[in-house]
Image (cartoon, grey):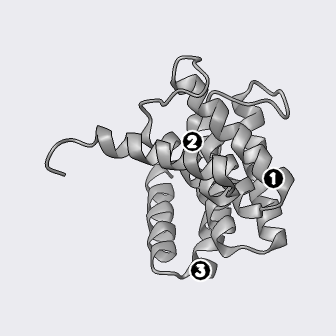
């Protein structure tokens, strides 16, 4: 069974990479529904399915992705609904989904998620860059999307800090 799951995931990701989204969808759905016995499998399969639904787009697919990510977050938070969890991947996926969904409320929710991740990664220090490049990029890109002079300046500062941290010669 483990081999079958791996083959399905690999095939689904290959189809997705080639733009065959609707062919990948039933593979990811089957993985999520039938092969998510452990929390780790549920997370991996749920993130794959949710991200695909997000890429496909449309109100129903975005809602389905939100339901999946919210369920993953609730499980990772010990069953407490609407509570941030310690799982960085789940939180980033949820923040990016809110970002894609747009609207002022969703953008504020995404900003809260990215800011909370950054604060936690910076040892609890608010408004402090962290060593996690993916979190810094997510926050910087989100601030760009939100626009406004203060947000664009903050995004520029994040990107400048990231550029200054690059190893020499790159």
Q: Which residue position holds label 2?
A: 89
Give the side of residue 129 with respect to residue 66, left or right: left
Structural crowding at the residue carrying mark 2, measured as other residues with C-alpha within 10 Å and reported as few (<14), some (14–19) or many (≥20): some
Nearer-the-camera pick, 25 or 128: 128
Q: Could you tell whether 47 is left or right of 163 in the image? A: right
Asked if the residue under mark 3 is in contact with the one under mark 2, i.e. CB atoms within 8 Å, the reply is: no
Q: Is residue 87 above or below residue 155?
A: above
Q: Residue at image x 45%, y 80%?
A: 18
Total of numbered circles in the picture?
3
The reply to whether residue 36 is in sight is yes
Q: In this view, does 94 lie above or below 10?
A: above
Q: How crowded is mark 3: few (under 14 residues within 10 Å), some or many (20 or more)?
A: few
What residue is shown with label 3?
23
Measured as percent of width and height from the top left, residue 78 is found at: 75, 24
Distance Cα–Cα, label 2 vs label 1: 19 Å
Q: Left or right: where does residue 76 sit relative to residue 64?
A: left
Question: Considering only vertical position in the picture, is 77 above or below 6?
Answer: above
87 up-or-down from 55: above or below? above
Percent across and percent down for residue 92 are: 61, 44
| Residue corresponding to mark 1 | 106
Indicate the secondary structure of the residue bearing disc 1: helix
């Amino acid at each position: 069974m483990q081999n079958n799951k791996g083959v399905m995931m690999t095939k689904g990701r290959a189809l997705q990479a080639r733009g065959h989204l609707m062919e990948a969808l039933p593979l990811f759905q089957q993985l999520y529904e039938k092969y998510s016995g452990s929390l780790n499998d549920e997370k991996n399969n749920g993130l794959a399915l949710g991200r695909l639904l997000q890429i496909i787009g449309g109100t129903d697919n975005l809602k389905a992705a939100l339901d999946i990510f919210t369920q993953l977050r609730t499980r990772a938070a010990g069953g407490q609904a609407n509570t941030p969890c310690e799982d960085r991947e789940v939180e980033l996926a949820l923040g990016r989904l809110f970002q894609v969904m747009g609207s002022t409320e969703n953008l504020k929710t995404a900003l809260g998620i990215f800011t909370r991740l950054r604060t936690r990664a910076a040892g609890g220090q608010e408004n402090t860059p962290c060593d996690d490049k993916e979190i810094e990029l997510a926050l910087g890109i989100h601030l760009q999307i939100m626009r406004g002079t203060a947000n664009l300046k903050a995004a520029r500062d994040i990107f400048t800090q990231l550029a200054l941290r690059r190893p020499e010669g790159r």
